[in-house]
Amino acid sequence: MTESPAPVPALPRFGKVAFIGIGLIGSSLAQVMRQQGLAGHIAATARSAETRAKALALGLADSAPDSLADTVAGADLVMLCAPVGTYGGLARAFGPHLKPGAIVSDVGSVKQAVVRDVGPYLPEGVHFVPGHPIAGTEHSGPEAGFPELFRDRWCILTPPPGTDAGAVATVRALWEAAGSQVEVMDPAHHDQVLAITSHLPHLIAYTIVGTADDLEEHLMREVLKYSASGFRDFTRIAASDPVMWRDVFLNNREAVLDILQRFTEDLTALQRAIRWGEGDKLEELFRATREIRRGIMDYGQHVPEDVKMRRLRRGEDPAD
Amino acid sequence: MTESPAPVPALPRFGKVAFIGIGLIGSSLAQVMRQQGLAGHIAATARSAETRAKALALGLADSAPDSLADTVAGADLVMLCAPVGTYGGLARAFGPHLKPGAIVSDVGSVKQAVVRDVGPYLPEGVHFVPGHPIAGTEHSGPEAGFPELFRDRWCILTPPPGTDAGAVATVRALWEAAGSQVEVMDPAHHDQVLAITSHLPHLIAYTIVGTADDLEEHLMREVLKYSASGFRDFTRIAASDPVMWRDVFLNNREAVLDILQRFTEDLTALQRAIRWGEGDKLEELFRATREIRRGIMDYGQHVPEDVKMRRLRRGEDPAD
């Protein structure tokens, strides 16, 4: 991980910003731009007419064309905020309509596939700065967004080698304006780290909730009823956007399968320790994992108090 | 699950209550009793002199003998709040010193093993009402307790067939005074439901955090740094008390191994779907699990607002 050496402008200002996809993340970023006056005009497109209408009704966008060409025409910044599986097709369609000097960025949870799928369709003179804000909730859609989502979170940028330093600095400044801490990273390294911190946990949460779903009806009812202890945390993770996560797993296959293999080996070892009553082995592991929690708390990447309060007031789970 | 037919007294009052073990759960229950004046005298014992001294210093107990005999002598209610693996040895030691008519209860997370280990050591005329408050945090020790811990939580009682209905009603009234909803259940059924809602999630969280712990040092540092998305939830669960959880797995072996086997099969199927790029299968599962979350929210077993606020004020994670 290396810091970008470019100077950081105080606040980036864009004439026109184009959002392609305007769900939880796009909506939240648009709200940041609105609040701080970072965009002269925001255009947002989405596959469904309903979402485009919502983007206008919620005041997230000034225009909501159904054509990609109209959306990106004249835009200084194009933010891809759709499921990563759609990126290649989208880039092929909007690439020829980009303004020279435009910056194309994104918010996808995998980065090697984004470089692979989008890069080839961007014309010379357009700057490509892929990004990943590590923030989210289990809610989806434009109405789920709120401008504090990124505050005190990490945002990782993975610009290809040789990307214009000024363009990188501009995207960095945007995320800093949203309250995030920005790091620049190699896309392969990003995908490996996120496979462990995010993709595997989601896969496991989806699995365990799916396992419970296959139980007999009466048992399932009781599982729902007594879910407070442990299972409930998993159901929150497993309520995340289905299409987004499908695309994450399909597009970070190798890193996910690699860490999943390690996890399965470790789980099998624990299974064996339980079967043979090896209490010492269990206790030893459980003591070690408790220490890791302390390590994380030391990093202090908590949910900010005001975000917790907002979520509480909306009756939502205030933890991230 | 059947409701006890006995009438529920408004508030149970005990002359003397004995706590054997006074960690997070015991401390919280003692504080409930203090607040509502339910006990004339609280005696608490623990294996370590340090914990006994804390119980006195925190005002949880009026006396903190180091002998089990002195602790239970004359007690109307004996609450076992130690790791379930210790129950058999404890019961053998204190059984002969119980007052006729005393109620023995507990807070262990497994119930068949408790009936098996404690039952044989209780003399005729003593009432045995095993219990399990489904509440907790990842913190341990008497100083981690707080009296709101049980509010709006479930507490499951598993009295053996033929147990005195008055004794069951008294224990029920105690947990209702703590703010819990009480259900009476067969111990085997309890162990099966909890294996799914609590024991398997904890086992998996311990495993994934352990898997991460085996990564190379530089990668592990980054996993800690970027843990906000998914992994952090697991570390909180995996910070739970090591000895308590060791004993849970050793004492609910069959139910845990059974659900673990199902989980492993489901995970293998998902792994295969990722390897072969079967996006439809992934999306289908992810949509189903999202519905389950909605089912749970409908049950409304959330963290009470005032508990969330207390946790927030202490800088803790407010979710359960």
Image (cartoon, coloured by chain):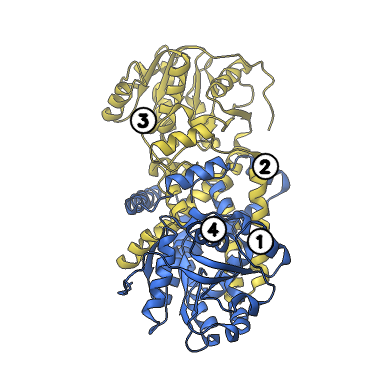
Chain colours: A yellow, B blue
Question: Of the residues under marks 3 and 2, which one precedes in the sequence?
Answer: 3
Q: Which mark is in front, 3 or 1?
A: 1
Q: Is residue B44 above or below residue A28?
A: below
Q: Neighbour class for label 1 at 10 Å: few (<14), some, many (≥20)?
A: some
Q: Amino acid at mark 4?
A: Gln
Q: Residues within 10 Å of mark 2 (few under 14, many from 20)?
A: few
> Could you confirm whether marks 1 and 2 are on the same chain?
no
Q: Which residue is mark 3?
A: A142
Q: Pointer 4: residues within 10 angstroms few (<14), some, or many (20+)?
A: many
The residue type indicated by label 3 comes to Pro
Using the rendered image, report if marks 3 and 1 lie on a common chain.
no
Disc 4: which residue? B31
Q: SS of the residue at dot 4? A: helix
Which residue is at 51% across, 55% downward? B147
Question: In front: mark 1 or mark 2?
Answer: 1
Inspect this view and state whether residue A4 appears.
yes
Q: Chain of mark 3?
A: A
Secondary structure category for the residue under label 1? helix
Residue B240's quadrant in the figure?
bottom right
- Could you tell me if the residues under marks 3 and 1 are in contact, i.e. CB atoms within 8 Å? no
Residue at the (64%, 61%) spot, across then down? A286
| Tag 1: amino acid | Leu
On the rendered image, what quadrant is the N terminus of chain B found in? bottom left
The answer to whether mark 2 and mark 4 are in CB contact below 8 A is no
Disc 4 versus disc 3: distance between alpha carbons?
A: 45 Å
